[in-house]
Image: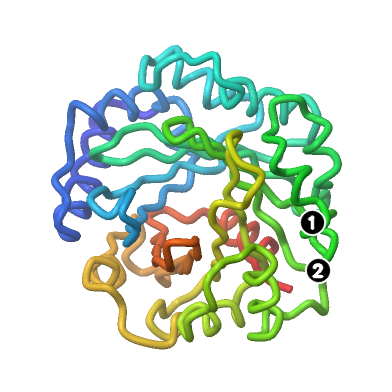
Amino acid sequence: MAGTTELEDLYSVIEDAARQTGVTSSRETVWPIMTTYQDVIPQSAIAFRVETSARRSNDFSCRFTMIPKEVDPYALALSGGITPRTDHPVASLSADIAAACPIDNYGVDFGVVGGFTKTFQFFPPDDLQLISTLTGIGAVPPAVAENAAFFERHGVADQVALTGMDYEHKTFNVYLKTPDGYLLEPKNVAAILGDLDMPEPSEALQTLARSAGGFYVTLNWDSPSVQRICFSAMTLDPAATTGGRLDPKIEQLARNAPSADPDAERRFIAYVASSPAGEYFKLLSFYRAQPDVVRLWREYEDN
């Protein structure tokens, strides 16, 4: 369990890192989340994220991962009062996935302004899951089955590395590892986006995709269409990974990202997302990246 001093120290890091990107942290929002997860914070990996989307451009996100599989992070969120109860299918989805699939560990996301948003279910990297398994889970959005042919066509129907659900926006993410030999070259990226009626990829997206080992899609319960697709890659140099200049907010995190180990090599995950409205960028910086986290992300990202 994290003591009060450890929580206070971590909150100060979060508050300062958010301020550097132009975001004012709300202690009233963040502190209850930290106390809800204080038992798992000491062994968790911790990361920070900013993005340029209209939805979250004014927030600063924090992520705890490597939460033991015996701990239900959504149940904790409910008991801690950091998210409202709902009868929407998203509420049962994490538990339903855990009942149907092997879980390696969990993760949670929250914003210093918006509060608790997401949970993640990481599957063992040597036991990636099937799209058909997900479609057999009652609470999963029908859109997963509606897009089964897309997953098959691009060779990822048996390559589900993790899932995530956004409780605020009622969306579901499916993270897919591209199979060995399937390179995310421009023609393949264009084919993937074309299949989803997304805009033509920018040079930044094409550049990042060359380093990516997969992509993830966002779906909901109200539409058969994929809402967004995002490509991500672990990197030591976010600007090089996207092939150009970074958005000022993202550049601030890239330059000033705090680290629990100042002597450690700083690692990031750079993202470019595409939606019918256009593209946007995200950058995640590891504050405390345990060796298992780096190993897991390499296995999820690398071909």
> Is 276 situated above or below 67?
below
Residue drawn at point x = 39 percent, y = 66 percent: 280
Contact (Cβ within 8 Å) of mark 1 with mark 2: yes
Q: Quadrant of the C terminus?
A: bottom right
Q: Look at mark 2 in the image and give the residue it sits on.
A: 179
- Placement of 269 over or under 76, stated as above or below: below
Q: Which residue is mark 1?
A: 159
Whole-percent x and y of residue 257?
28, 63
Q: CA distance from mark 1 to mark 2?
A: 7 Å
Q: Please give left or right for residue 100 compared with residue 271 in the image.
A: right
228 is higher (above) or lower (below) than 173: below
| Marks 1 and 2, the one that precedes in the sequence | 1
Picture residue at 73% right of the left edge, 80% below the top: 183
Q: Is residue 41 left or right of residue 130?
A: left
Q: Nearer the viewer, residue 61 or 57?
A: 57
* Rendering coords of residue 245 (x, y %): 31, 84
Give neighbour class at mark 2: few <14, some 14-19, many 20+ (Cα, 10 Å).
some
